[in-house]
Image: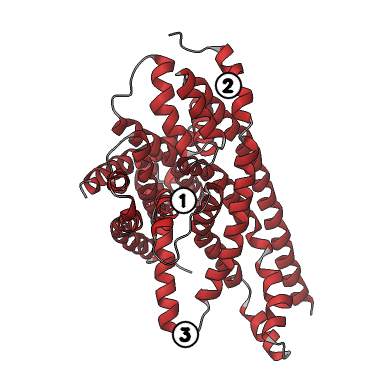
Amino acid sequence: MSKWQWDTFFDAFPMVVQGLGITISLTFACYLCALIVGFVWTFIRRMKFKPLRWILLWIMEFIRSTPPLVQLFFLYFGLPMVPVIGVALDPFTCAILGLGVHYSTYIGEVYRSGIDSVDKGQWEASQALNFSTGKKWTKIILPQAIPPTIPMLGNYLIIMFKEVPLASTVGVVGILQLANNYGAQHFRYLEPLTIVAILFLVLSYPSAILIKKLEVKMNRRFDKKAVLKESKGAVS
Amino acid sequence: MKGVEITLKVLFASILLGYSMAFIAGFCRLSNNIILRSFTGFYVEVFRGTSLIVQLFWLYYALPMLFGWDIGSNFWAGVLAISLNYGAYMSEIVRGSIQSVAKGQYEASTALNMSRFQRMRLIILPQAVRMMLPEFGNYLILMLKSTSLVSLIGMADILYQGDLLKDANLSLAPTVYFLVLVFYFIIALPLIWLTKKMEGMSKKGVAS
């Protein structure tokens, strides 16, 4: 068997690329799920009732420190067998739930760091101005907490993009699955797998650079604001 | 559950290899030699840009075809994939923390007539390692999670054993996978504790 065959490469390429749509849409679906569930974790962290908070935080730690692959298997193979709440999920939903919830624990931490970074004076000021809780969050805290976390959130999008091939193990036909299928049919794994690697690199590397640029821009903007505030303080 | 032993073996091997890879690549990226620097830069970007599962399959299925030699066993394919992947991520941390040691420290050690090696070993590294510790702890847990992938290339780790049990009796599936999750969590607990401790260590005795 010769080592590298260009015709196999070109033969496999269109087939593997077909899966790209599914891989990308799955990434965004998981990401959306993680963004939403992440809010839930942040909310839990701020809960007043201690025992419940404690239990839920341990659950979060549990989800965080166990492999997403096993969680996927649990959802896909295990859940339908659970007596009462057992529902059979199709692979796509299963992947969204599994990966989404797994990464939501990370996203929740990002939110938390954003909220923690809001200056204490802002909390006090909104209280002094007699804002309601809802208004305090929507008008004062969140507008300041979210922008600094955007680069971090973007990083997680890229990380999730790279984790999505895990879903091929429960039967989502993304690029990795197609490459493996091709490999099994023609008994040539080298070219299709290389294509997959190249596709990932081509998609994730530019976006990583973009996010880095965004980060620099954000940093500059927030620094400028801080500098401005200081200089104003000095003048008055 | 005999799988725990294999999971732990893979974990330790990849931790050792991964950390050494991180330091080697981290230093290479700081070297003055432009070929060495760009080569490691290429390595880091490739391994950071593609996903671990793809690398794993590539090392296991594709590499033997490309060069005609086998990587030996699925154990080494798994360990290599995990450690090369996380080595690439961690080398960035190594580089970042070495670069963030204050310039004055370099100048002072030069002024004290230290050799390059002495400067690195006695002055820079002790300060840089302290900054690396918390991040390294996080990567321990990430590596543990990624060891579950080796079951996909046929290693009999915890997950693989769980799969076998599930195949034997499908109605056991929820219990089996839950147990597998619990096993991973039990292995992760000391690592979480270690991470917290490392964070404490890196904060100790530093102003602000």
Q: Where is residue B137 in the image (x, y as percent from the top left)?
A: 38, 55
Three-letter code, disc 1: Gln
Three-letter code, disc 2: Ala
Mark pair 1, 2: CA separation: 55 Å
Q: Where is residue A86 in the image (x, y as percent from the top left)?
A: 44, 61
Q: Which of B170 and B134 is in front in this view?
A: B170
Q: Mark 1 lies on which chain?
A: B
Do dots 1 and 3 share one subunit?
Answer: no
Q: Nearer the viewer, residue B119 or B45?
A: B45
Mark pair 2, 3: CA separation: 56 Å
User: Does the rendering let one see residue B66?
Assistant: yes
Q: Is residue B66 above or below residue B172?
A: above
Q: Residue at x 51, y 80 (%)?
A: A47
Three-letter code, disc 3: Phe
Label 3: which secondary element = loop
List the residue tagged with mark 3.
A49
Q: In this view, does B139 lie above or below A3?
A: below
List the residue tagged with mark 2.
A12
Single out the mark in the foreground, 2 or 3: 2
How did the renderer colour the structure? secondary structure
List the residue tagged with mark 1.
B105
Q: Position of residue B90 (x, y in %)?
A: 44, 44
Left or right: residue B32 versus residue B7 is: right
